Image (cartoon, rainbow, N blue to C red):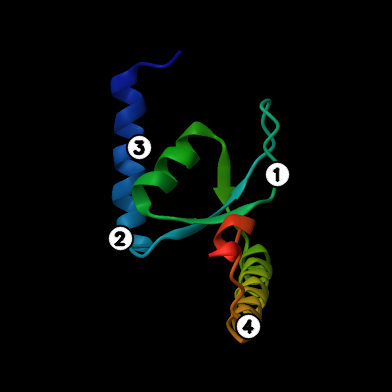
Amino acid sequence: MQDLKLYWRKIRQLESELKRTHPNGIHLSTLATDNGVTPGLIKLALPFAAAQCLVNGTHVVATPDQVEAWQVDQERERRHIEARRRWAADMPDVFVVNHAEAQR
């Protein structure tokens, strides 16, 4: 196990570098791990979280192709959610009334 001071120094140094190069976040790709994480999942992480993931070895910086595919998926999901929201808004209101309330 590495020294905790060294561990956090690595994270702070990488965070500082990422703040300069990617202040609004960086796309990361998951690596396969022993606990069953699916490799290749993309996420956008702010510098501190990204530094932790990179130092821990659970993620790598995503390739431009991975980021583009992720953005396409995010847009498709956004459109799907919006379509369902519009569909739900067009549905008539339904009231559920139990038998006792209906008798009043």
Question: In the structure shown, which secondary structural element does the residue marked by tag 4 occupy?
Answer: loop
Residue type at mark 3: give it. Ile
Judging by the rendered image, the residue that carries numbered circle 1 is 39
Q: Residues within 10 Å of mark 3 (few under 14, many from 20)?
A: many
- State the residue at coordinates (62%, 74%): 94
Of 103 and 86, the residue lying toward us = 103
Of 45 and 93, the residue lying toward us = 93
Judging by the rendered image, the residue that carries numbered circle 2 is 20
Q: Could you say which disc has been placed on residue 92 in the image?
A: 4
Query: In the current view of this chain or complex, which residue is farthest to the top?
Result: 1
Dot 2 or dot 4, earlier in sequence:
2
As drawn, 40 above or below 81: above
Residue type at mark 2: give it. Arg
Distance Cα–Cα, label 4 vs label 3? 54 Å
- Across and down, in percent, residue 65 comes to 68, 67
- 31 sits left or right of 49 in the view: right
Distance Cα–Cα, label 1 vs label 3? 22 Å
Residue type at mark 4: give it. Pro
Mark 1 vs 3: CB contact within 8 A: no
Question: In the structure shown, which secondary structural element does the residue marked by tag 1 occupy?
Answer: loop
Dot 1 or dot 2, earlier in sequence:
2
Dot 1 or dot 3, earlier in sequence:
3
- State the residue at coordinates (61%, 64%): 96
Q: Could you say which disc has been placed on residue 6 in the image?
A: none
Residue type at mark 1: give it. Pro
- State the residue at coordinates (57%, 37%): 58
Picture quarter containing residue 30?
Answer: top right
Distance Cα–Cα, label 2 vs label 3? 14 Å
